[in-house]
Amino acid sequence: MNQLVVQKYGGTSVGSIERIKKVAARIARMRKSGLDIVVVVSAMGGETDKLLDMARQINPDPKRREVDLLLSSGERVSSALLSMALDNIGCPSVSMTGRQIGLITDSSHTRARIKEIDTERAKRVLKKKHVIVVAGFQGINEHGDVTTLGRGGSDTSAVALAVALKAERCEIYTDVDGVYTADPNVVPDARKMDRVSYDEMLEMASLGAQVLQFRCVEFCRKYHMPLIVKSSLLDESTGTLICEEDSSMEQAVVSGVMSDKNQAKITIKGVPDQPGIASKIFTGIANASLSIDMIIQNVSEEGLTDISFTLPKEDMDEAIKIVKKLGEVIKAREISADSDICKVSIVGAGMRSNSGVAAKMFEALSGENINIAMISTSEIRVSCIVDEKYAELAVRVLHDTFHVSTEQGEAELNNGAQSA
Ligand code: ASP
Ligand code: MG
């Protein structure tokens, strides 16, 4: 058996006929070097948005089942075209939809989770020495209906296939050279990282680093699948390896600074401060498969309290609907929403062994007069909700404060500052 590699090409990489041909040539070269290859493709750049836009022009609130069938077509187009391009240069290949590759999901349309992959057909095709070109981002549920895995879901298709087929590694080809310490468009001296641990990448992916879908990193970490992110546009891209943390990794206190403008905050004011209220609110939201990020509850006054939480902007309207209904039941005084917010975060495995990191972050933000509305932390992350207009400034200031552009990050933090 040859070594098997799963390669995923994103929307930019297959964004035009010329680029599809270029990707085909790259795959054929690697195939010649003796690798078995399963390719996963995204829709051609911008296609998914175009399809969504058409849907909304027809019906402002389309059924999610129909949205899935519509969106899955984008990836089918690019997989069939890439397969044709491969055949045309003498590299035999077969394109496959989610159903054909055996990818079974639950029934949460537009954000389905993978339940299993039936690899029998894929294995047969690989034995025949064909490259398989899979339409990413999609599967079918138990009723045979088409589902999709959430925006950016082709990354997750690729890793799940790599795990199921026991691939050597999974390679994600994109339009950037790897994972950066911050968005280079915002921070000119942001640096490409050579290696990042699963834990750090997981935090970064959940914090607005657009380069990988969160669930894809979750999968890799769970199954110890090495993941490489690199550019399909540059021939000499070394990329970033995402793998188990080890002692050879940089032990920077802060490895990356991220901001996420795709955040909204909902506040429920005047909620009775009684057992069971938070559970009612958040069970209602969880039942709609909406995922909440930060939650704060204020100290109660006269038996009433305020609860605020954040979630992705696109889920705001749905969450408001649910909270309004619940608000009547629990007799809340007022419900308000704010979508002009942003979450800025610092991430670094080195935080585990350094104190005072959070304090230093707050100081840096206050030095720029940036007000912090909410704070949350994990072992290797600190996040603050700030006004959306400060997103770029906050990232630049924090990147600078923690010297993220230099490899060593910084060690001087240890000097007696209080614990984060
Ligand atoms: N085409 C889908 C999207 O734009 C999935 C993907 O590209 O991974 O979100
Ligand atoms: Mg993507």
Image (cartoon, rainbow, N blue to C red):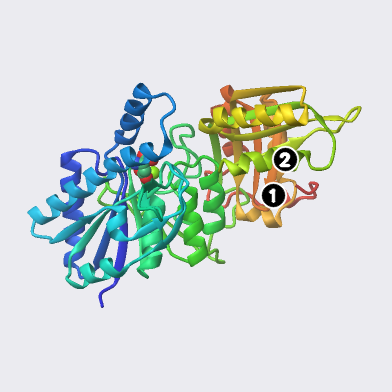
Q: Is residue 172 left or right of residue 397?
A: left
Q: Give the residue pinned by disc 2.
A: 280
Residue shown at 55%/66% (left/top)? 246
Tell me: residue 77, above or below residue 24: above
Label 2 or label 1, whichever comes before in sequence order: 2
The answer to whether the residue labelled 2 contacts the one labelled 1, judged by CB atoms less than 8 Å apart, is no
Q: Nearer the viewer, mark 2 or mark 1?
A: 2
- What label sits on residue 412 in the rendered view? 1
Q: Is residue 8 visible?
A: yes
Where in the figure is residue 162, as x and y percent of width and height? 37, 63
Residue shown at 64%/24% (left/top)? 337
Amino acid tagged 2: Lys
Where in the figure is residue 194, as x and y percent of width and height? 44, 55
Q: Is residue 176 visible?
A: no
Q: Quadrant of the N terminus?
A: bottom left
Q: Is residue 122 left or right of residue 305?
A: left
Residue shown at 24%/68% (left/top)? 36
Q: Nearer the viewer, residue 132 or 269?
A: 269
Q: Which residue is most to the bottom?
A: 1
